[in-house]
Amino acid sequence: MTDRITLTGLTVTACHGVLDSEKVEPQPFIADIVLETDLRRAGASDDLNHTVSYAEIAQEAEQILSGPSVDLIETLAERIAAAALTRPTIEAVEVTIHKPQAPAGVPFHDAELGGPSVTVRREQDRQVVIACGANLGDRGATLRAAVRALDATAGLTVVRISPLFETDPVGGPEQPDYLNAVVLARSRLAPHTLLARLHEIESWHGRVREIRWGARTLDLDLIQVGDPWAGTDLTSDTDELTLPHPRAGERAFVLVPWLEVDPAATLRVGRDAESVTELAGMADESGLRPGPAWEVL
Ligand SMILES: Nc1ncnc2c1ncn2[C@@H]1O[C@H](COP(=O)(O)OP(=O)(O)OP(=O)(O)O)[C@@H](O)[C@H]1O
Ligand SMILES: Nc1nc2c(c(=O)[nH]1)N=C(CO)CN2
């Protein structure tokens, strides 16, 4: 995403440095912070909750800069970047720390903006689980194209693709059998950006939403973002986006392919990270059969 929020010239006088004199004689430290984040939703809604408050980021950085003394400006940059990345909507952050009056034994031309600086860039990197299904048209070709489109998404890398399963439809009106698969990916993208991308790929394949659980050319569901076992997964509880996917834990057509790409997978159920193997053991697997090989599609 090329959208950015930029904070330039945040200045704090503090005692960071390797030299003993720097520990007692305050000098200015200046931070420039660039947050990479998808601003389309906030731009459309005018809602602060859909973006990141620059004031919050600035105050947090100010606290780090005026906090306990450290030796290196690298440490300050790293800490500011790590704090910014705790927000789910920030895809990446670049932090530059200037130390214009650093005692380096040489004169710098500009006492306010010259001198040494360090820049670090850190990216979000989360595991993403996406369930894919199709039961209209050339199901295999559609799923193949969808996986390609996922992998072509900037900020998302497909890591593993499960085998295809031929599955009986679960719920909804009478309809043809599905082909289902699960894709494991890594991504820096915020959950709403991921969802928007899944909808975009669905729409390229003529996906329409008329009947709940009705037949569809392509269905891409966001099952989980982050790792519940490590406590790093993201949750969301709106109709627009519910994370983890509220019905994933009982769907054999999601759980069984998921185990193929991650036998140790866990799914958040309430406060717990539950083993997907155990959940699959409780789900009704009778409607699942091996599907065609991806290679023959
Ligand atoms: N985790 C999620 N993944 C995909 N869509 C979601 C998720 N949470 C909420 N939604 C919302 O659900 C709405 C309906 O999605 P969709 O048409 O794919 O449902 P469905 O596949 O028929 O049913 P189900 O949600 O049971 O799989 C979408 O508008 C989407 O915004
Ligand atoms: N077998 C099968 N049944 C379903 C599927 C699906 O992908 N496979 N998707 C649904 C809504 O997402 C509803 N029912």
Image: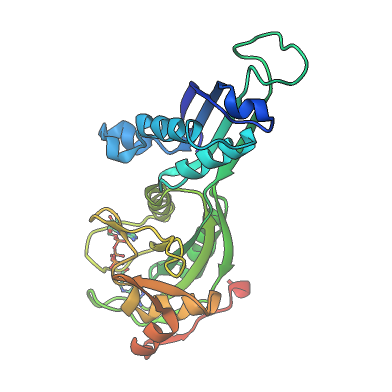
User: Ligand 1 sits in which quadrant?
Assistant: bottom left
Q: Is residue 164 above or below residue 138?
A: below
Residue sitting at x 59%, y 63% = 159
Residue sitting at x 47%, y 72% = 181
Q: Nearer the viewer, residue 23 or 284?
A: 23
| Residue 97 on image: x %, y % | 59, 28
Q: Does 250 sit left or right of 182 as displayed?
A: left
Q: How many marks?
A: 0
Q: Nearer the viewer, residue 276 or 7?
A: 7
| Residue 18 on image: x %, y % | 68, 33
Q: Is residue 47 above or below residue 286?
A: above
Q: Does 19 sit left or right of 2 as displayed?
A: right
The quarter holding residue 294 reads bottom right
Residue sitting at x 60%, y 39% = 75
| Residue 149 on image: x %, y % | 53, 54
Q: Residue furthest right?
A: 106
Residue sitting at x 74%, y 11% = 107
| Residue 227 on image: x %, y % | 46, 65
The quarter holding residue 208 reads bottom left
Q: Is residue 120 above or below residue 234?
A: above
Q: Residue furthest top?
A: 109
The quarter holding residue 60 reads top left
Q: Nearer the viewer, residue 271 or 76?
A: 76
**Quadrant location of the C terminus in the rendered image:** bottom right
